[in-house]
Image: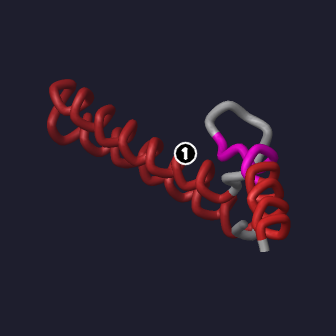
């Protein structure tokens, strides 16, 4: 996992960038640019959220890898291999 200071730094500057970008875009291009900025911001924040999920793949949540089940299957396979050897 990445250090907490590094993750906090990235999140802070990503949010600051997105806020300033939306303000600049609305000031220069009007309200028409807001949906475009919203879609791009949603995409960037989604990439950041996916990166956080990829940092810890073996947690006890529904969308993480089932490490407990994998361990059981590996132990059964090793036991079967030892019996057959």
Q: Nearer the viewer, residue 49 or 53?
A: 53
Q: Nearer the viewer, residue 43 or 37?
A: 43
Q: Nearer the viewer, residue 19 or 53?
A: 53
In the rendered image, which quarter contains the N terminus? Answer: bottom right
Looking at the image, is 81 positioned above or below residue 57? below
Q: Position of residue 65 (x, y in %)?
A: 66, 46
Q: Is residue 71 visible?
A: yes
Looking at the image, is 24 positioned above or below residue 32? below
Q: How many marks?
A: 1
Residue plotted at (55% across, 45% down): 49
In the rendered image, which quarter contains the C terminus? Answer: bottom right
Q: Nearer the viewer, residue 47 or 7?
A: 47
Q: Position of residue 11 (x, y in %)?
A: 59, 54
Q: Is residue 15 left or right of residue 81?
A: left
The image quadrant that residue 76 belongs to is: bottom right
How does the figure colour the protein chain or chains? Answer: secondary structure
Residue 74 on the magenta span: no
Q: Is residue 4 visible?
A: no
Instruction: Please provide the residue range marked out in magenta.
Output: 64-70
Farthest bottom residue in view: 85
Q: Position of residue 2 (x, y in %)?
A: 70, 68
Farthest front residue in view: 84
Q: Position of residue 62 (x, y in %)?
A: 67, 31
Residue plotted at (68% across, 69% down): 6
Helix, strand, or loop for circle 1?
helix
Residue plotted at (79% across, 60% down): 80
The image quadrant that residue 61 belongs to is: top right
The residue under label 1 is: 49
Residue plotted at (59% across, 55% down): 54
Q: Is residue 57 left or right of residue 47?
A: right
User: How many other residues sit within 10 Å of disc 1, few (<14), some (14-19) or many (≥20)?
Assistant: few
Q: Is residue 67 left or right of residue 37?
A: right
């Amino acid at each position: 996992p990445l250090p907490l200071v590094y993750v906090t730094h990235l999140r802070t500057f990503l949010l600051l960038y997105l806020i300033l970008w939306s303000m600049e875009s609305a000031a220069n291009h009007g309200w028409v640019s807001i949906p475009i900025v919203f879609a791009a911001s949603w995409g960037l924040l989604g990439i950041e959220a996916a990166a956080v999920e990829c940092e810890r793949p073996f947690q006890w949540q529904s969308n993480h890898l089932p490490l407990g089940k994998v361990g059981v299957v590996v132990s059964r396979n090793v036991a079967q291999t030892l019996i057959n050897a």
